[in-house]
Image: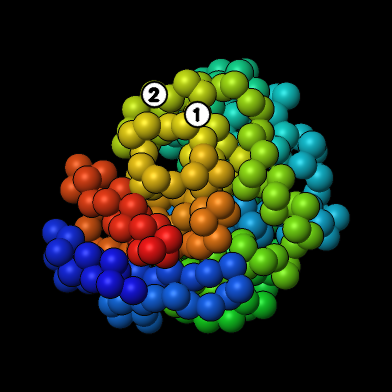
Amino acid sequence: MQSLLMIEDWPVPNAAAAVVRGTDGAVLGAHGVQDHLFPLASVTKLLSAYAALVAVEEGVFDLDDPAGPEGSTVRHLLAHTSGLAFDEHRVMAPPGNRRLYSNAGFDVLADTLEKASGIPFAQYAAEAVFEPLGMRATMINTAHRAPAGAGGLSTAADLARFAAELQAPTLLDASTVHRATREVAFPGLSGVLPGFGHRRPNDWGLGFEIRDGKDPHWTGTTSSPETFGHFGQSGTFLWVDPAAGVAAVALTDRDFGPWAAEVWPRFTDAVLAELRG
């Protein structure tokens, strides 16, 4: 895919990699070093959320089990509506009242899963998600300040395998993935989309951001409202556009900033245009 060559012009210090995958599992295009290990930052939340959903299906806990502040549940933590602050275990709002994006909430989610399963969270994620999907390089760095929310390390090749799983689930029932990625959890809530300001509404599924009508956005101007995924402050993203039947991953070694808000949407629009054409 010629559109993937655009990453060569991105203002990154050393490394960038991208891969595009279709709904049939085929790699439609790849560019850059596919086995280079990148810090994922908040793209980690997709992996952690998937591990939590596996735990739900395995009966480790339930989405509506209490977790976090009084009145909060596993569902609230996944949807960033527990009321916890961004990086502190401090309650800022009643559960279900606001979309408060929270690394702390994912810390609590990981702790809750650990206590319920008796297995360290990083190990659970590896055994439930990474190993079955062949994501051999992927790990959650437990020494990171917010391991379950931002401590992941992975490669473009591994994340492409995860993107394929999101498009055609093998580890979860398809209805569970649909609920997490296509159905807004706690509809109508406003909140801050990191890097892009306040959004009304700021729609989210269970661990997955849902694009809907957000503008501007880190995906493309031509991305469908059904597009879901996440980006990370380390200069990384993964999106799936169900309407287009495609998923894309891009990893870089430059932190997110105005440069990314400028080049990422152009890249996504070019990918979608090439596939349509």
Report how far apart the C-alphas of labels 2 and 1 lie in the structure. 8 Å
The residue singled out by tag 1 in the image is 202
Q: Residues within 10 Å of mark 1 (few under 14, many from 20)?
A: many
**Occupied quadrant, residue 80:** top right
| Type of the residue with mark 2 | His
Q: Which residue lies furthest to the front in this view?
A: 277
Measuring from the top left, give residue 71's x and y in whole percent: 73, 24
Q: In which quarter of the image is the N terminus?
A: bottom left
Residue 128 shows up from this direction = yes
The residue at 70%/50% (across/down) is 178
Tell me the residue at 63%/26% (across/down): 187
Mark 2 residue crowding within 10 angstroms, few (<14) / some (14–19) / many (20+): few
Which sits in the foreground, 14 or 83?
14
The residue wearing badge 2 is 198
Q: What element carries label 1?
A: loop
Q: Is residue 76 placed above or below 171 in the rendered structure?
A: above
